[in-house]
Image (tube, helix red, strand yellow):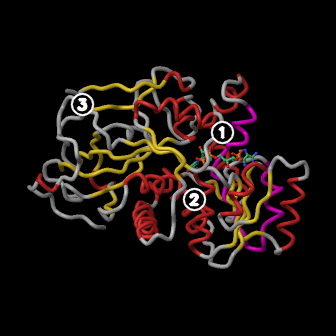
Amino acid sequence: MHHTPPSEHSDLVTSSLPWSPKNNRRVTFNAYGGPEVISVVTEPAVASPGKGMARVRVMASSLVFTDMLIRRNLYPMLKTLPGETLGYDVVGHVEALGPETTGPAPGTLVATLTQVGGAQDWVNLPAASLVPLPGHLDPIKVEPLILSYMTAYQGLFREAGVSAGAHILVIAATGAVGLAALDLARALGLRATGVASSRRKALVEQMGADFIAYDAPDFSRRIDLAAAQQGGFAVILDGASHEPLPAHLRRLARGGHYVGFGLTALLRRAGADAKGLRLIFGRLRLGMKVLRILATRLRNPNVHFYDIAGRRKAHPDWFREDLTTLATLLADGRIAPHISGVFPPERAAEAHRLIEDGSVVGRLVLDLRGSGVLP
Ligand SMILES: NC(=O)c1ccc[n+]([C@@H]2O[C@H](COP(=O)([O-])OP(=O)(O)OC[C@H]3O[C@@H](n4cnc5c(N)ncnc54)[C@H](OP(=O)(O)O)[C@@H]3O)[C@@H](O)[C@H]2O)c1
């Protein structure tokens, strides 16, 4: 833990925006639905932080598939109401600590997972949840580490305990988490095979991975073949849920791990507005419970259904340690998040449209560094 006592020195604050109760921009949604329900509201900012809280001037937040699920009321882990603020994570500078609160000193660059509420200029957050980071890092480049890289990293190293030299299969390889996994594999000495659509072949190969197209007619057989060639994969990191679990289990090496974390293929197949989607995924909160029970019932310690918020709750120390590790890899230039767009809050709906039509490679980032100050 890297807690320092509260500081009286407000001149340490590095935010370019002066504190004002008038100018908080937040990205919200008026109803469950498509990107058109997104709006940006400017209103009085958060009050002073209470005991145990810190006020953070946010520099960057998420624009990811999961935000889209939350907006459509399809997110299995959390019930969110229209009017709430989006933003699955936060990178920013501590501005003030609440009374009798210890935490990173004002001016410190910090990051944390919020699930909702991160996409606004200022937010009060529990001081103990903030992970201090080297102040010279670019907040835009740090932001993908919190959700996307963390999911890939913990899936590979905490869930599966993979070691250097192992061969992993990454399914949904050019998405936010998938590209993070390929980047980490390259940095940390894993061999990788990536599964994405045929248009992404060059990118996957550029990341140093072998490529298999999921839109090729014989793609299942190709994965079987690739598995057989090396005596099975050490880890299958699956963000698509395109194929049933037994298909993956037969592709694992002895002692290998399956780590499922996402449902992109299932969701795309159903179509974002389909009635069936609501029927199936409106019940996903229940669905996830069933999956977990199923995993326990299988009594297979090598099958994991990763849930970042649940993992952080169970092991806040791992989250802190792993985010620090990822920030060090970034600072040392060993990883390089693939950011294909940076959007201010006013263009958040446009970014959500790109996420929905499946055209995003890697990550989009919400940029809150600009001025939201009213004249
Ligand atoms: N469990 C957790 O804690 C956790 C954490 C983060 C994310 N997630 C979830 O994980 C999923 C992926 O997240 P993300 O942010 O990486 O999403 P994303 O950026 O939207 O990922 C899209 C990727 O999925 C690929 N894809 C689509 N259909 C596929 C199929 N049938 N087979 C293989 N790949 C397919 C796409 O390939 P093409 O573009 O080539 O079609 C693209 O590479 C989402 O469901 C998200 O909500 C869960």
Instruction: Identify the element where label 1 is drawn.
Output: loop
Q: Residues within 10 Å of mark 1 (few under 14, many from 20)?
A: few
- On screen, residue 172 above or below 350: below
Q: Of the residues under marks 1 and 2, which one precedes in the sequence?
A: 2
| Amino acid type of the residue that numbered disc 3 sits on in the rendered structure | Asn
Mark positioned earlier in the residue sequence (3 or 2): 3
Q: Nearer the viewer, residue 304 or 43?
A: 43
Residue 215 in magenta stretch: no
Local crowd size for mark 2, using a 10 Å CA cut-off: few (<14), some (14–19), many (≥20)? many
Q: Amino acid at mark 1?
A: Gly
Give the residues in magenta.
243-270
* Residue 300 appears in the rendering: no
Q: Given the image, on which type of amino acid does mark 2 rest?
A: Ala
Element class at badge 3: loop
- The percent coordinates of residue 262 (x first, y second) are 64, 47
Position of the C terminus, as image quadrant, is top left
Q: Is residue 150 positioned above or below 54 on the image? A: below
Disc marking residue 23: 3
Q: Residue at x 12, y 58 (%)?
A: 7
Where is residue 41? Give x, y as percent. Answer: 34, 25
Per the image, the residue denoted by label 2 is 180
Work out which quarter of the rendered image holds the N terminus and state it.
bottom left
Q: Is mark 2 within 8 Å of ligand 1?
A: yes
Q: Is mark 1 within 8 Å of ligand 1?
A: yes
- Residue of label 1: 358
Q: Quadrant of residue 260?
A: bottom right
- Residue 263 among those drawn in magenta: yes
